[in-house]
Amino acid sequence: MNPTISVLMPVYNGELYLREAIESILGQTFTDFEFIILDDGSTDYSVNIIESYRDARIQIVRNKINLGIVDTLNKGLQLAKGKYIARMDCDDISLQERFSEQVAYLEEHPYVGITASDIRFLDENNELLGALTPDEVKLHLLFYCCLAHPAVMMRKKMLDQYQLSYNHVVAEDYDLWVRSSRYFQVTRTSQPLLQYRRHGSQLTKTKMVENTESTVSIQKKQLRELEITPGAADLLIHSEIGLLFNSKKELYFYKDMQMKLEWLHLLQKQNEKKLLYSKNNVVELIARIESEYAKYILIIDMIQQKSKLHRLYLFGGGENGERYLELFRSYAISVEGIIDNAVTKWGSTIRGVEVVPPNVLIEEKGNVFVVITSIYAVDMAKQLEGLGLVISRDYIIPHIITNH
């Protein structure tokens, strides 16, 4: 008898986190599955780790040479015997209830061909993305890849019916979700069932460029379905709108908003003709972004007023700090210094602004206002509170937070 689920997990030199990934699958409360682990020519100890398990549900498939993710996944799709196909990556962790929850959902929603759970980033208390209906998924896919690949479960019958598999593109998952959404319902559920690991070895700089190019190509195809032929500047604006789908948004995401709103209204106009996306969802999207932009204006105005009365500091350098520095300069907001906990950075400059230690806030207490620009905002806020600073009066975390 065929299993209910076929789990597909490609592995290439994944020894570092592989045991955690395997054991999170073997520890599922829903046990009727085959676990197809596809080794794509690993040269580390990955195969030894896989072979150390004696669970009969594990099937090891070894590529003689490195075929790449697309051919490896397609091989897995051909081998899969389950009613459902669960994707898994060799560096993530599936929560124990993942399979039971996703199977129950697909059993209750027979017209859904692909569903993804929400995710938690390991070692981070990230804002959850929230559930998306089939119509919302289609619209979100116009702007960004809204499903986490290793959190997905797919209905094999529907993939076979429409002859859907992975194409040879770098953003192979994004491409598959877009094509699938044209044939059947694709959803995202609100419950986080996967812990997603982010680490430095995931994407090289070259791979990041290739992934961006592939993503832009997928978006361009969707825009052409709306009879829009975008130029390079249009595609840049379109991709920046994709940032506004994050649940936690940095202020600089709202730069050049007039151009972004004009672009959104063009999409709305073309969709009125082609009816590819829910008209109500497009209207709601534009209304939400306009509302968030209004909040952005209020926050910028408050920071401007604070900067006239106090010495303004940013807490956190790096890329995020630089972007805030650029944003504030566009509003003629003067920044006194950039606070950083790293001793080695003290005395250096970022775009002409000196990096200083946190104790300057004690020395100038009562005459400072701090904008936290670090991605570790919660920890920074605790540090400022420890120095006697009070949120809103003395510092701000300038995120606009929404759930969709």
Image (spheres, grey):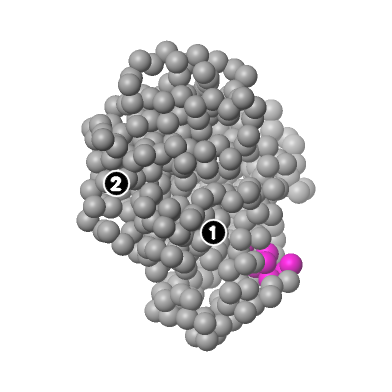
Q: What span is colored magenta in the figure?
A: 232-239
Q: In this picture, is 112 found above or below 363?
A: below
Q: Residues within 10 Å of mark 2 (few under 14, many from 20)?
A: many
Of the 4 image quadrants, the one containing the N terminus is: top left
Please identify the residue farthest to the front as the structure is shown.
1
Where residue 203 sits, quadrant-wise, is top right
Q: In this picture, is 30 found above or below 43?
A: below
The residue lying toward the viewer, choosing from 215 and 292, is 215
Q: In this picture, is 276 found above or below 96?
A: below
Query: In x, y percent, where is residue 243?
Result: 55, 59
Q: Residue at image x 62%, y 25%?
A: 64
Q: Residues within 10 Å of mark 1 (few under 14, many from 20)?
A: many
Q: Disc 1 marks which residue?
A: 144
Find numbered disc 2 in the image and state the secondary structure of the residue it sits on.
helix
Q: Which mark is residue 102?
A: 2
Q: Amino acid at mark 1?
A: Tyr
Q: Residue at image x 52%, y 18%?
A: 47
Q: Amino acid at mark 2?
A: Gln
Query: Does residue 246 appear to the left or right of 93 in the view shown?
Result: right
Q: Residue at image x 41%, y 57%?
A: 161
Of the 4 image quadrants, the one containing the C terminus is: bottom left
